[in-house]
Amino acid sequence: MTHQNISSGITPLVFTDLDGTLLDHHTYSFEAAQPAIDFLKGAGIPWIFNTSKTLSELLPLANRLDNQHPMIVENGGGIALPQDYPDADLSEIANSERVPGDSEHPTADGYCLVTLGAARKLIIEVLADMRSSFAFTGASQMSTSAFAAVTNLDEAQSGLALERYFSEPLIWRDSEQKLSEFASALALHGLHLLRGGRFVHVIGNSDKGRAMRWLCERCWGQADNGVVTIALGDSDNDVAMLEASDYPIVIRSPVHPPPPIKHVSVRISNHIGPAGWTEMLFGVLDELGYAVPAGKDYL
């Protein structure tokens, strides 16, 4: 299956964060992104969720948006790959290198789950030994109602967010100095942490950038095949994805400044959240030769 712009020979792949990027930070609405979503579907351009969310959280959204592409979940800790995805070599993936705590590639809801970092069970075991030295509350310790109070999700949505395979979100209750010490202690176990909008996330030796590269290589090949990556995100946990992309786009947030990105081509949206998503995505696709709507037609 090809998704090339025939006139340029380019195959664009879009990787997007969700909260604060495709979804409004406060309301979780994607209404302002709908024009660009419709364009991607009409042009046959793959658009891949690359998010801290779980597979269980993403399935209703993917169904609602008719997104049938792979999903990078839990900050790059793993990938949910549709078992019938036409561009994927599942035989190669099934034989990929194992990681700590991962004995097999399970399946769930029609997806093959690939662990890139570490299995959550291992992460929780490591954290249990660190509770006497650091003050934090892990998602595995929280009820659905407590998690809902922190995230502004309802209890049903919170239950989905707590169904994790590859990571453990934490509410940090200690000092910044202790957080630095905590990160060093995690590294001794092959784990690291990422800052998100509401949590710090503990995962294995992976991130959104590594997961993006892994997926590109196995499903679409390399840059010499005309593949270019467009990445959109708003937070510190998007930095690895943005810096690994060809077209990094920082979406302005209503609650924090843009994260610093080490990339010569980084762009920052004028608009906030999903409106900025549409604004900037259309701008890049226009540069790549696609006939996108004029700004007055979608903003």
Image (cartoon, helix red, strand yellow):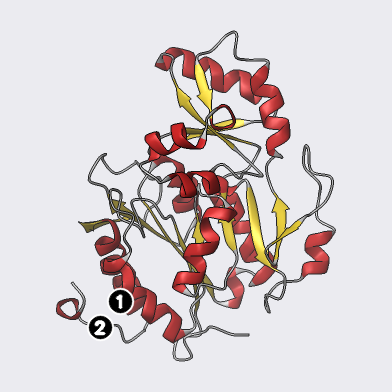
Circle nearer the viewer, 1 or 2: 1
Q: Is mark 2 on a helix, strand or loop?
A: loop
Residue at the outermost top position: 132
C-beta proximity under 8 Å, tags 1 and 2:
yes
Q: How far apart are marks 1 and 2 (CA)?
A: 9 Å
Q: Quadrant of the C terminus?
A: bottom left
Indicate the quadrant where residue 155 lies: top left
Residue type at mark 1: give it.
Answer: Pro
- Dividing the picture into quadrants, the one containing residue 114 is bottom right
**Disc 1 or 2, which lies upstream in sequence?**
1
Residue 219 located left or right of residue 271: right
- Crowding around mark 1 (Cα neighbors within 10 Å: few <14, some 14 to 19, many 20+) is some
Q: Which residue is drawn at 26% across and 47% down?
A: 253
Q: Is residue 253 left or right of residue 225?
A: left
Of residues 28 and 20, the one drawn nearer to the viewer in this rendering: 28
Q: Which residue is drawn at 65% across and 37% down?
A: 204
User: To which residue does mark 1 refer?
Assistant: 35
Q: Which mark is residue 293?
A: 2
On the image, the x and y values in percent for residue 50 come to 51, 56
- Numbered tag placed on residue 27 in the rendering: none
